[in-house]
Amino acid sequence: MRSLTRQLAEFAAGLGVGDIPADVADKIKLHLLDGIGCGLAGAGTDLARRVLASVEAEHAGGPCPVLGTALSLAPAGAAFVNSAAMNALDHDDGFEVDGKGMGHPGATLVAAALSGVAVARTDGATLLAALAAAYEINARVILSIQPSYERFRQVYGVCQHQSLGAAAAYGRLLGLDGAELANAFGFAGTLAPVPSLRKYNWDARPLVSFKDFNAPATEAGVRAVHYARAGLVGAADVLDGPNGFWRMIGSDRCDSAVLCDGLGESWWSRHASFKPYPACRWMHTALESFETVRDAHGLAASEIEGIEVLTAAGLARDFMEREPRTMVDAQFSLPFCLASLALETPCPDWYASLPVDDASRASLARRVAAVVDDEIDAWMSGPKRQPAGQVRVRARGRWLEGPRLSYPRGCFERPMDRTEVVVKFRLNAAHALSPSATARLETAVLALDGLADPASTFQELRGAR
């Protein structure tokens, strides 16, 4: 019998556009558009500029465009920088099942695919198939290796597994067959970053700059494909057996059936999610609850006397930094993000200033308090790990109560529609591209399967204003 690793590799190598359900194909195009938009907005941040400076110093030039700049680098270098830019604002997509978040696939898979297209000059149909296969494999890998709640409290990695998805996308675009791609998976699994969520400096701010470690996973997947193409030998059947990737990545259990059951018929990639706010997904229900109150009552920031966030004990402990000193810390700050919403700051501009430099934002942030709610704490802190939240706003002499939400907007249960995703792309892309370039890029991506030369289209990404 073929190993599970080989079955997934052959699925990626052989998938054609005609094999992809229409709704999945349309969704993958939106995720490509969303990832590019997030990267264009993120490329202008101080974080992305520092990443580029470090990578440019050690990577050769090449054919792969670096988002939002006039630069191009060799495949692994460009993939690393673009992945970091896509994740920089924490606005990039996710993968969620029943509310439980399991990574940020787009910042890895799209970044790897952009390098692959530039190297191989494939057509749009091949790019669509490569991304569809990568999103599906990525989803199945992380679903299969979910640890027990006890192990989750000890060790977990948010995006480390995405090295395998990156190898799937990049390897398919470079024309690897099933055997070659299985070998690349062997490298991708063993090159993946170690799971490090418990060492993000929660008790010793500032938080780590890479937070989700998308970029190292992206680079690992791209390098894995090059090692396989060079004839080097990777770990055989890396996803199989009692000592497979699940064990390497720190899990204490593996549901192997999830990897291949219904492959090509049941699409877990339908659970890939979009983020309406540039902030940690754990906060999105509280942010939406506040925005609902703000809009329903037409509240101005100056009218807000106080905000109570009903949340879990963990968020009350770790997500209440009122004066974050870095952009990453601000992305995990309920006071900061609620103040940004109260001020109606456009999402791509949330981190243009921090409270230390913005008196209005600092004043609002000081009015935010967290209240541990037993029901919400049970949803968020137990094995289900489901984001939930609610806010109460003190304004006009009374308390105004927002809805209690247990699923964040943009997930499978509460999807964002096509128009919302496209508008989000336009706002993000405007930070780096002209309106005409943004429009051309949008049109091309949404008609991806008919695009003859996406590499030429993506040269638009180098046309920084």
Image (cartoon, rainbow, N blue to C red):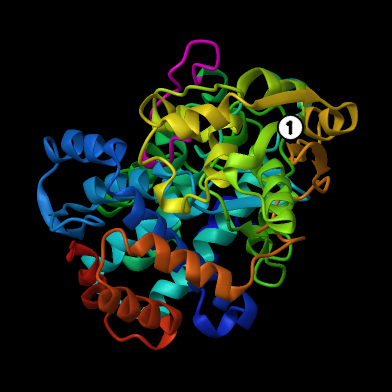
Q: Please indicate, yes or no, whether residue 170 appears anywhere in the rendered image.
A: no
- State the residue in front, 195 or 86: 86
Q: Is residue 203 magenta?
A: yes
Left or right of 358: which side holds 365? right
Vertical placement of 420 versus 51: above or below? below
User: Which residues make up the magenta segment?
Assistant: 200-215
Compared with residue 199, is residue 101 higher up or lower down, i.e. above or below? below
- Name the quadrant containing residue 284: top right
Farthest-out residue, front:
397
* Residue denoted by label 1: 309
Q: Nearer the viewer, residue 175 or 99?
A: 99
Instruction: Return the x and y of residue 131 as percentages of the image width and height.
Output: 47, 66
Measured as percent of width and height from the top left, residue 210 is found at 40, 32
Left or right for 295, reference 198: right
Question: Measuring 64% from the left and 41% from the top, which residue is drawn there?
Answer: 303
From what the image shows, is residue 122 above or below residue 178? below
Q: Secondary structure at mark 1?
A: strand
In the picture as drawn, the residue positioned furthest to the top comes out as 204
Residue 97 within the magenta-colored segment of the rendering: no
Magenta span main SS: loop
What is the x, y in percent for residue 158? 56, 36
Of the 4 image quadrants, the one containing the N terminus is bottom right
Q: Quadrant of the C terminus?
A: bottom left
The kind of residue tagged 1 is Val
Return the residue nearer the eye: 462 or 262: 462
